[in-house]
Amino acid sequence: MQHIQQWGETLRLLVELAGTAAFALSGVLEGARKKLDAVGIFVVGFLAAFGGGTLRDLLLDQRPFFWVRHVEMLWGVMLICLLSMLFMRSQHIEVTQKTIAIPDALGLGLFAATGVDQALGANMPALVVVLMGVITGVFGGVLRDIVCNEIPTTFRDHQPYAVCAFVGGWAYLGVWELGAPGWLALLTCLLVTAGLRGLSLWRQWRLPVWLG
Amino acid sequence: MQHIQQWGETLRLLVELAGTAAFALSGVLEGARKKLDAVGIFVVGFLAAFGGGTLRDLLLDQRPFFWVRHVEMLWGVMLICLLSMLFMRSQHIEVTQKTIAIPDALGLGLFAATGVDQALGANMPALVVVLMGVITGVFGGVLRDIVCNEIPTTFRDHQPYAVCAFVGGWAYLGVWELGAPGWLALLTCLLVTAGLRGLSLWRQWRLPVWLG
Amino acid sequence: MQHIQQWGETLRLLVELAGTAAFALSGVLEGARKKLDAVGIFVVGFLAAFGGGTLRDLLLDQRPFFWVRHVEMLWGVMLICLLSMLFMRSQHIEVTQKTIAIPDALGLGLFAATGVDQALGANMPALVVVLMGVITGVFGGVLRDIVCNEIPTTFRDHQPYAVCAFVGGWAYLGVWELGAPGWLALLTCLLVTAGLRGLSLWRQWRLPVWLG
């Protein structure tokens, strides 16, 4: 058991890093598309990577923020922004949205799981717990799009994204209600969210059209 | 007295529900106009309904948030978003801004009153108290417009809106300074704010032009 | 020593007032360019003047906010907004970005210094301390631009702005590490930040181009 739990912790750390990196990268790409300058790239990268988790901590009143506890993540995202700028400058290669779809889906799942995790710890009611997971997973991208003066992609591309995190959050709660250990609930949430996101990209699922 | 106070509480609850519903509806309408997908509609509806009160609680450092204390409001707004989408799908009827003008004015007044109320309870100075009322009443709509990539309507349509809440806030303070009970001050703020808003719509009042 | 310290305090207060005024003015100008109504002008002026410091206090969990402790600053900014509207109405004079460049640079330096100052007092790690300085100096303008539905100028005009505050923040930390008194570190940060900003405007420095 101890062994599996440790494996869970390592998995969590690895995917959290991959997720943060993917979200930072998505910020850099969006910033590049909008022709921001170097400072703008850094800011949008930071917003995408840390926006969701910071909003989570702010709403749940949890201090210090996760990037104060793990300052190395700030340095890491800075490095990612710097390297991607150097790379884009030398290669003229366009990193497409497709390239980052997999780490982005993993990031969504992980961030959603941490949101649910912390909201549960703060004794929130079930719906708030799930919504906190959605907010954590989604709002980094939302802030990125707002600063880039766009309607957030998630709210208008008719692809399931926030919905995946919503389902994943309820999956977390379901497993947790059955008395399963924390790492298993977290893993379930991650797999359901990222899996649904992956499936919906692969099968080109669309949100139901509601406007006549 | 007890009787009147209870009547005040019931009034407050009723109008708070009507206000939240009206703001949620205004979010749905704005989202529909911007052709958001179903997820976007939910998010904009939630932002419009809960944005002002959440910012109030965040600035005044009051936890738990009001939607944590009353989770049923989250479910209610979810239902409103869902029903309006189904309705718009089946009816092809455009719900105009006019339709929601009355509940919106009531919502503005009520939210302003709760902002003033809570800021007073937190011993803020008078100007801050009034501004907190304005922020609570107005910022749901501001966040709605920002996410929809618009300059907030309130800041450019030359109609008195935030100003009504500003006057209503001072009215609350005035009545309260006279030693009146809380429900009376709250009712005054509500009536002054919503009344001014209604009057300004009816008489087509305009903010003074200041740009030469 | 006491004498110099007091001189430092007076300097700090004076420049803080000048900085707040300059930022408020920059908000009014941006709002006028976007043809906002009178209420919009007030809001954008307030956001520009108080946004950075409020975000700083929110992230560092410091209450009461500085504008609650110094309500006279709220009245002051209100007056500035009112007077500039009256002035613009009567004079048809366009106050250019150049006019406010000097107080704006001072404001950037001072706000950055207060951000570093408070983050140090909250025992944040070095990088967070410096970033908090940058956020305090820069985010008033960012919020101003977001409400006006623009990509924030700082992120796309290729002029060093946030970078000046970044360097100034490290300068503060360097001087402070040497055991210098607080006012000296604060003054260093102010001079380095505002100096770099002034130099970069004068010599027309540009951020390195990174997009091929």
Image (cartoon, coloured by chain):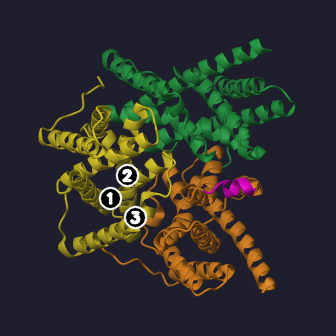
Chain colours: A orange, B yellow, C green
Q: Earlier in the sequence, mark 1 or mark 3?
A: 1
- As drawn, the residue found furthest toward the left would be B203
* Residue linked to disc 1: B27
Quadrant of the frame with the N terminus of chain C: top right
Separation (CA) of disc 2 from disc 1: 9 Å
Q: Nearer the viewer, residue A125 or B194?
A: A125
Name the amino acid, label 3.
Answer: His
**Marking on residue B70:** 3
Q: Nearer the viewer, mark 1 or mark 3?
A: 3
Chain designation of label 3: B
Amino acid on which disc 1 is placed: Gly
Proximity of marks 2 and 1: CB atoms separated by less than 8 Å: yes
Look at mark 2 in the image and give the residue it sits on.
B140
Q: Earlier in the sequence, mark 2 or mark 3?
A: 3
User: Which residue does the image show at 17% across and 53% down from the upper left?
Assistant: B98
Which of the numbered marks, if any, corresponds to residue C174?
A: none
Mark positioned earlier in the residue sequence (2 or 1):
1
Establish if A76 lies above or below A4: above
Which kind of residue does numbered mark 2 sit on?
Gly
